[in-house]
Image: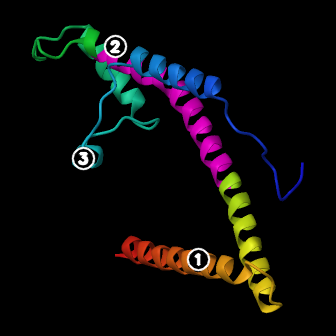
Amino acid sequence: MNENNRISKVLTSKEITSVQQCLTTLKSELGFLQNLTPNERKNLPKINSANKIFAEDSIHILEGKPQWVPGALTAEEARKDLTLFEQLDPIILELEGLLRQLKDTQTIVGSEVYRVALSVYSLADAARKMPMEGAQSAHELLKARFTQSMNTRADTAEDTVE
């Protein structure tokens, strides 16, 4: 593996279609998934390893059907929710791992192409100083794009800080 070119791959149309079909199937199988608003995401009470036993104990109490519990609270629905919560755990872990790999791979190939671009920019700068034919116009184009991209990065960084 060449450190400057760790990945040399382009997805075929067939591979892209296959991945998209897999994603469509996954979305279809998990058609019950929902989105939360940022406020809901922040404010909903959450189950975790520390309070899971508490939730399980409450289900056991519901199964005893005490008179003081309203009929709207059912052990059956609570157990279904807890089961689904547990079933989603390994799926989420697998997808988080896959998403991390996708992002890391995209970062690697993006870095590779950006390094090439920086090298071409440096070579164009050196070639224009000699002077070599076409180097001046190539350098001017790349310099304008490079400066523009640096200004955009600075603007984005300022937006993130605020």
The numbered disc on residue 43 is: 3
Asked where in the image residue 98 lies, by quadrant, the reply is top right
Quickly name the residue at label 1: 146
Of the pair 43 and 113, the residue shown nearer to us: 113
Amino acid carrying label 1: it is: Phe
Quick check: is 13 in the magenta stretch?
no
Quickly name the residue at label 2: 80
Give the mark, 1 or 3, whose residue is nearer the N terminus.
3
Amino acid carrying label 2: it is: Lys
Check disc 3: other Cα within 10 Å, few if <14, some if 14-19, many if 20+.
few
- Give how far apart the Cα atoms at labels 3 and 2 are: 22 Å
Q: Is residue 48 above or below residue 153?
A: above
Residue beneath the point at 62% across and 76% down: 142
Give the mark, 2 or 1, whose residue is nearer the N terminus.
2
- Give how far apart the Cα atoms at labels 2 and 1 are: 55 Å
The numbered disc on residue 64 is: none
Of the pair 99 and 139, the residue shown nearer to us: 139
Q: Is residue 5 above or below residue 23?
A: below
Looking at the rendered image, the disc whose residue lies closer to the viewer, 1 or 3, is 1
Please say which color scheme the image uses.
rainbow
Q: Secondary structure at mark 1?
A: helix
Q: Secondary structure at mark 2?
A: helix
Start-end of magenta stretch: 78-107
